[in-house]
Image (cartoon, rainbow, N blue to C red):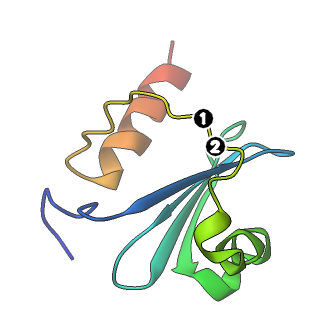
Amino acid sequence: MSSRWWNKDAKYYFLDNPGRLYVVLPWGKVAEFHLDTGRHKYGTSAQFSELAKVLAKGNNTNEETEIWATSLRFSSITDLMEAKEKQGAR
């Protein structure tokens, strides 16, 4: 999907050790971002074993979740990578 609505109805999961952000998209694909290195990967949820364990829990996945206000209003995933590159250039 290519538009500014790419993340509509997406679900976000943060996992630690190492810190990762998973964006689970409604059409079955997942974007994984390693928070320490910026490394990223895109694929099906089955390709991410740690995320698969979380998703397998079903409705209980938020048992230990803290709700934080965020402003994840990126028009595209490239905005993330562009910001990371600019930060590294400092």
Q: Which residue is pictured at 51% across the width and 12% down the height?
A: 90
**Placement of 68 over or under 16, stated as above or below:** above
Query: Splitting the image into 4 quarters, where does residue 83 fall?
Result: top left
Q: Which residue is pictured at 70% across the width and 40% down the height?
A: 37
* Camera-nearest residue between 82 and 6: 6
Provide the secondary structure element on which disc 2 rests: loop
On residue 27, which mark appears? none
Amino acid type at circle 1 is: Glu
- Left or right placement of residue 31 versus residue 66 in this view: left
Q: Position of residue 42 (x, y in %)?
A: 52, 72
* Camera-nearest residue between 3 and 89: 3
**Placement of 27 over or under 82, stated as above or below:** below
Q: Position of residue 73 (x, y in %)?
A: 24, 39
Amino acid type at circle 2 is: Thr
Q: Confirm or deny contact between disc 2 and disc 1 (CB under 8 A).
A: yes
**Placement of 76 over or under 27, stated as above or below:** above
Q: Position of residue 63 (x, y in %)?
A: 69, 52
Q: Position of residue 8 (x, y in %)?
A: 23, 62
Residue bearing mark 2? 65
**Placement of 55 over or under 28, stated as above or below:** above
* Camera-nearest residue between 29 and 38: 29
- Cα distance in 3D space between marks 2 and 1: 4 Å
Residue bearing mark 1? 66
